[in-house]
Amino acid sequence: MTVVSLHPGRNELGAQQRYVRLREQRPDGFVIFDFAIGDPQLSCELIMPLATYQEFCASNHVVHLNETQAAQLDEEALKWRYGQPGVSE
């Protein structure tokens, strides 16, 4: 039996894709990152020890956002915050 998803951004089992954007790997062994489900523009910032972060990413089958994707998210956020990208006042 083939399962067809009726929702974009979801896999055949209905679970939404998860995204991680690494922000900082601190010298004390902690990792700061953004975690999103379904839409990488809607994320929360988390902090975990590196080993826990690696386990978290593996168990959630995350997509790691690259620098280009992260820059696109930042530019889109500027549009919402200031009305156009690059405008800070």
Image: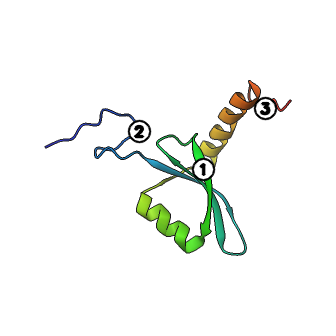
Of badges 2 and 1, the one in the foreground is 1
Q: Is 49 left, or right, of 4 in this rendering?
A: right
Which mark is first along the chain, 3 or 2?
A: 2
Residue beneath label 1, please? Answer: 44
Rendered location of residue 42, percent (x, y): 57, 41
The reply to whether discs 2 and 3 touch (Cβ–Cβ < 8 Å) is: no
Rendered location of residue 30, percent (x, y): 65, 70
The answer to which quarter of the image holds residue 11 is: top left
Q: Amino acid at mark 3?
A: Gly
Q: Nearer the viewer, residue 19 or 14?
A: 14
Q: Secondary structure at mark 3?
A: loop
Q: Is residue 78 above or below residue 13?
A: above
Q: Secondary structure at mark 1?
A: strand
Question: The N terminus is located in which quarter?
Answer: top left
Rendered location of residue 55, percent (x, y): 47, 69
Q: Is 65 left, or right, of 79 in this rendering?
A: left
Of badges 1 and 3, the one in the foreground is 1
**What distance separates the C-alpha of mark 1 from that of mark 3?**
23 Å
- Name of the residue lying farthest toward the top: 83
Residue beneath label 2, please? Answer: 9
Residue beneath label 3, please? Answer: 86
